[in-house]
Image (spheres, helix red, strand yellow):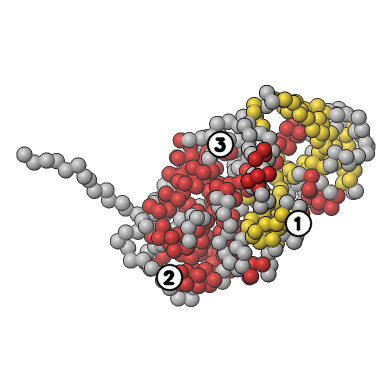
Amino acid sequence: MPVESDTCRVVHEVTVAAGRFAPGHVGELTRIVPFDMVDAALAETGRNQRRVRDLPSRVVVYLLLAAALFAECGYRQVWARLVAGLDGLPVAHPTPAGLAAARRRVGAAPLRALFDLLRGPAAGPATRGVWWRGRLVCALDGTTLCCPDTPANLAVYRKGGSHHGGTGYPMVRLAALVACGTRALLAAAFGPISVDEKGYANRLLEAAGPGMLVLADRNFGYRPMLTALAGTGADLLIRVKASHRLPVCRRCADGSWLSRIGPLEVRVLRCQITLATSAGTRSELYQLVTTVTDPDCAADLVRLYHQRWEIETAYLELKSTILGGRVLRARTPAGLEQEIYALLVTYQALRIAICDATIGRPDVDPDRGSFTIALNAARDQLVAATGVMTDTVIDLVGAIGRQVLADLLPDRRCRTTPRVVKRAISNYVAKTALGRLRGPSYRATISIDILTDPDP
């Protein structure tokens, strides 16, 4: 009696570029960073190949973006993932030296041009949680990345140090302007840590303008920065030191008052914020300055300032979710510039994919889309080489978006957790930090008291 076979054959059909350009893709993210856009960036920067090589310039750009998706892999392993879904197609088998030479040939300029093309809020006028009274809510801040400890890198990037000890790797400072509602990048600048984040912030001012509300912490609450930000036409909401006594020029009905910082007229919000949990109650005095003069919105502005933490989440996604806390790959400053721009382009493409998925769901805030799910879905699509090219009907959601929508994060809860040192740099961290491990989070109740007296 014949026995039915319990096996089957699945035919995987992919549509990619022809010939030697076939490995040039990033799966479904290619719809966001299409061939035409990459070719335009290469042409604008003069990095198009003069002859068609085994590794055309367009393919090298996509290799660099794929390397940002697979930060734990070497470039040979990244190449293997690019061609894994191209069974039956003749593809190149480059050596490590060939891949390195191709990356040097392309340089950083095309990646920088791609970032300039993609940067933006990634939101529509009706996108939920992005705007406040017609203003795009943004945040400005800086962070650091570690790079390989090579003589070439040490010639430009120095190691960090403090009273806790020094860092084992040279450090790169990155400053960015981020749209809080989508965590998309509006602008970014980076370089050695010998320049502080305020120095890099000055390079981001051209991205600010009317119709924006820029949030920043106390590090940016000094007169030249406040004046420069206000000079762009953007409104600002920035924390300043509570000990800084600002004179009262005129009182407002909501408890705030008008004052001056140099030539700039600002509105001062002085408030006591109390956080109550089952573990106890603590309070802190905040002093904010803003150029927003809308009446009766003092408490709203104080609550809105909490949105500044969205840029910290964006940095977490860059440094922890994508990089996994790893040191960057590049062993030269030129390579670092190329790698960081590729990282920023890839991050922005993922953010756009999340926003595209939620654009048809006005009830869903884009920050409920899981960045981790989007990253893993993009990796899967790259390995399978699916979604690279579309038919005439464009699917804004796509496979990445469908996975994001299928597992949305819950609405943000009001919770708090004690601040701790997450990654101490002391050699004796195992002994000295035992009492500072991350503890539980607590449900919290926040109360805001506007202080009408500037000197209570």
- Binning the other alpha carbons within 10 Å of mark 1 as few (below 14), some (14 to 19) or many (20 upward) gives some
**Outermost residue, top direction?**
278
390 above or below 159?
Answer: above
Judged by depth in the image, the label closer to the viewer, 1 or 3, is 1
Observer able to see residue 17? no
Could you tell me which secondary element the residue under label 2 belongs to? loop
Residue at the spot of label 2? 95
What amino acid is found at the position of numbered circle 3 in the picture? Answer: Arg
- What residue do we see at 66% from left, 49% from top? 428
- Residue 289 bears which disc, if any? none
- Binning the other alpha carbons within 10 Å of mark 3 as few (below 14), some (14 to 19) or many (20 upward) gives some
What amino acid is found at the position of numbered circle 2 in the picture? Answer: Thr
- What residue do we see at 64% from left, 28% from top? 442
Judge from the rendering whether residue 427 lies leftward or rightward of residue 326; answer left or right: right
Residue at the spot of label 3? 368
174 above or below 155?
Answer: above
Residue at the spot of label 1? 196
- Depth check, front residue: 57 or 152: 152
On the rendered image, what quadrant is the N terminus found in? top left
